[in-house]
Image (cartoon, helix red, strand yellow):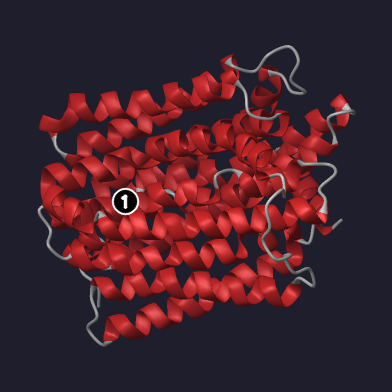
Amino acid sequence: MVGPLDYGIFGMAATVHGFAYVFQDFGLSTVTIRKPDLTDSERSALFWLNLTLGATLSAVVASVGFLFAAFFHEPALRLLLPAMAVSFIINGAHTQLRAQLVRDHRFTELNRIEALAFTSSTAIAIGLAWLGAGSWALVSLVLSSEVAIAIGVWAKQSWRPETWRLGLGAAHLLRSGAGLSANDGLRYAQRNVDLFLVGRWFGAGALGVYGRAAQMASLPTIYVGDPLSNLAVSSLRHLSGSPAEAREFWRRLLNSLAWIAVPAAVAFACFPSEIIVVLLGARWASGATILRGLSVGLLALPVGMGCGWVFLAAGPSRRLLAWSSLATALPVAACLLLRTQGTTWIALGMGATSLASSLAGLAFIGSRDIVRPGDAVLAMVRPIASGLVLSALLLLSARLTPGQIPVHRILIAGVAGGTWAAAMWTCWPAVRQEWRQHFLWRRQ
């Protein structure tokens, strides 16, 4: 199976690949989603632009493999990065068809495609890992997922691009995507600067442990926050003429995300060692303190994502770039200041700066926006308050089960969590109403 060293080597390649991946789209899929009157010629222009950008990025990333191999002191990157670069060409071939599914609000079909891609690529990676492929098993995860998504969206879309010709209006489409792409690059740097610097400063083994903890801390973002983003931005734009409905929709999204992020943050903070050992194995146990530090940032995850949705729905602006620049500068400063303290303190610094930048996003919301900072307070107040109760119960269960094996401590913590959920449902009608609203809203 894949150990910390293999995972760290892949993490080095993934950090470089991921940064380039941000510019793969160049904001053009968002142009497709947001543009009210998109012609067939413009759709074709967007398709060929994405494919051209994908091929260009593929060549660039493949050519810099030896540079980053020297930067990270890891020769394996000379082959890993060129192999992963192939994904840009595949992505460029399906980006616009995927964006059209979002534009048409065909979210159920898109979710099925992505779920099938995740399942099939994971199965392939696990099989290769058992065969001893090491970091190459993780590379296969990236490539096979892109292939599966490409097959799925091409099968679901009846539209096909026109043959490329001059005069399809590419210039103004690129200008529309440029601001979004710059923002995406800054946000990626904010999320991943710690991985880049940990790999450089402490090596592949340390990065492997740190990266797995960071991946676990980002699960609410990956599986809940990011999938909600397309729905949120598209819906907020459509509701821009109905401020009351837009504010209610935004509060509900933040509240639903908070009911996932806050309990996850509490669990990661109270039982990091047990969670990592049970889910990943004992060889990853040193990542427990890293997971605890990163969990701090989850508390404000709904606010940070919610502010981003508002700004993206309004279109690229100086406010968006200013906030993204601040949100990037804070973690960079934290990493540089805490370098000598080790990876645990870097993780805590990242969690704290994530919390600070998310709250700072509220200061960038202006009078013309459809939401207000007070809406975020209304959305977060009950999840945060109940999270304090949950943390007290989990800490009590931890004190009552000293020396138990991790599985037993997790089971007892689960009982405490179940007690908390039953108490919230029974004794706090407002919480019960929020839970019911989320369930009924998703079924509508």
Is residue 283 visible to the viewer in this orientation of the structure? no
In this orientation, which residue lies closer to the viewer: 354 or 41?
A: 41
Q: Amino acid at mark 1?
A: Val
Q: Residue at x 44, y 66 (%)?
A: 87
Q: How many marks?
A: 1
Q: Residue at x 72, y 65 (%)?
A: 161
Q: Residue at x 46, y 36 (%)?
A: 187
For the view shown, which residue lies furthest in the right direction? 242
Badge 1 density bin: few <14, some 14–19, many ≥20, Cα 10 Å = some
Left or right of 168 on screen, residue 239: right
The image shows residue 18, relative to residue 34, as above or below, that is: below
Pointer 1 residue:
16
Q: Residue at x 56, y 35 (%)?
A: 178
Secondary structure of the residue carrying tag 1 is helix
In this orientation, which residue lies closer to the viewer: 433 or 332?
A: 332
Residue 414, position as x, y percentages in the image: 47, 58
In this orientation, which residue lies closer to the viewer: 253 or 176?
A: 176
Left or right of 188 on screen, residue 214: left
Residue 382, position as x, y percentages in the image: 64, 32
Is residue 5 visible to the viewer in this orientation of the structure? yes
Residue 143, position as x, y percentages in the image: 43, 72
Residue 172, position as x, y percentages in the image: 67, 37
The image shows residue 183, relative to residue 22, as above or below, that is: above
Picture quadrant of residue 112: bottom right
Picture quadrant of residue 380: top right
Specify the quadrant that holds the C terminus. bottom right
The image shows residue 315, relative to residue 137, as above or below, that is: above
Specify the quadrant that holds the N terminus. bottom left
